[in-house]
Image (cartoon, helix red, strand yellow):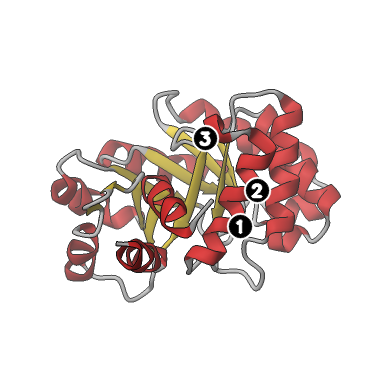
Amino acid sequence: MDDVSAAKILIPLLDLTSLNDSDTNESIIDFCKKASTPFGHVASVCIYPKFVPLVLRELEGKTKITTVINFPTGKADSQTACKEMIRALNAGADEIDVVFPYQRFLKGEITLCQEFLQNIRENCPQNNTLKIIIESGELSTTRLIQAATQLCIDCGADFVKTSTGKSKTSATPEAANAILETIKASKQEVGFKASGGIKTLEDAKKYLVLATSIMGPDWVTPKHFRIGASSLLNSLFETIKKGY
């Protein structure tokens, strides 16, 4: 796959993300202008819950809105996470990225993690996409990544996502491979999202090629495959411009 083709494929697969402590209404308004490109709309715009109403007005329904819940710490308090999620959905969010209680998972508290995921799923309508962030860099081994992914699948996640982008280790091809192989083996209709540290076409292309090789080219659509990133879009634009 040549770089220009890859860049054009990646734009509609992008969850364009701004999750900075310095975000303001003004910066988010400017950010929203990037969602519509000469090569199509990005898959969604991902922002903190407090900006959902503002982004809803700015995007006017042209692009989906993603927000983050239980972010980035991944606490095991599903009641608070559900309340936060419901507020965001009522404000206009289309998609929810929830951080898995990975620290409790590492302690072996599997039942607690299962109950957390089940409560989130029960409170998230089926027409809203639910992505679970397992924080793969903190899980450290392929076995743990596979086990966390399987638990998310069993509890009804629409997507399994690698990372918050706030931990020491973010997305890696190795973690992506473990997640994708687990999804494939499950034979369930579950998507994959890579996020954290993906800044260039070269970075993103690794995940695109990996997903295509494991799941097949027809699987790699916004319904099943996303990349969450803030600065990647600029790299994709530069690559496409150089190709003309």
Which label's residue is closer to the chain start, 3 or 1? 1
Q: Are there few (<14), some (14-19), or many (20+) residues within 10 Å of tag 1?
A: some
- Of residue 184 and residue 101, the one placed in the foreground of this image is 184
Left or right: 229 in relation to 114: left
Q: Nearer the viewer, mark 3 or mark 1?
A: 1
Which label's residue is closer to the chain start, 2 or 3? 2
| Residue at figure coordinates x 32%, y 41% from the top left | 93
**In the image as oriented, which residue stretches furthest toward the bottom?**
22
| Residue at figure coordinates x 55%, y 57% from the top left | 205
* Residue 135 percent coordinates (x, y): 65, 57
Left or right: 151 in relation to 118: right
- Dot 2 corresponds to which residue? 210
Q: Residues under labels 1 and 2: Cα distance?
A: 6 Å
- Dot 1 corresponds to which residue? 206
Q: Which mark is residue 224?
A: 3
Q: Nearer the viewer, mark 2 or mark 3?
A: 2
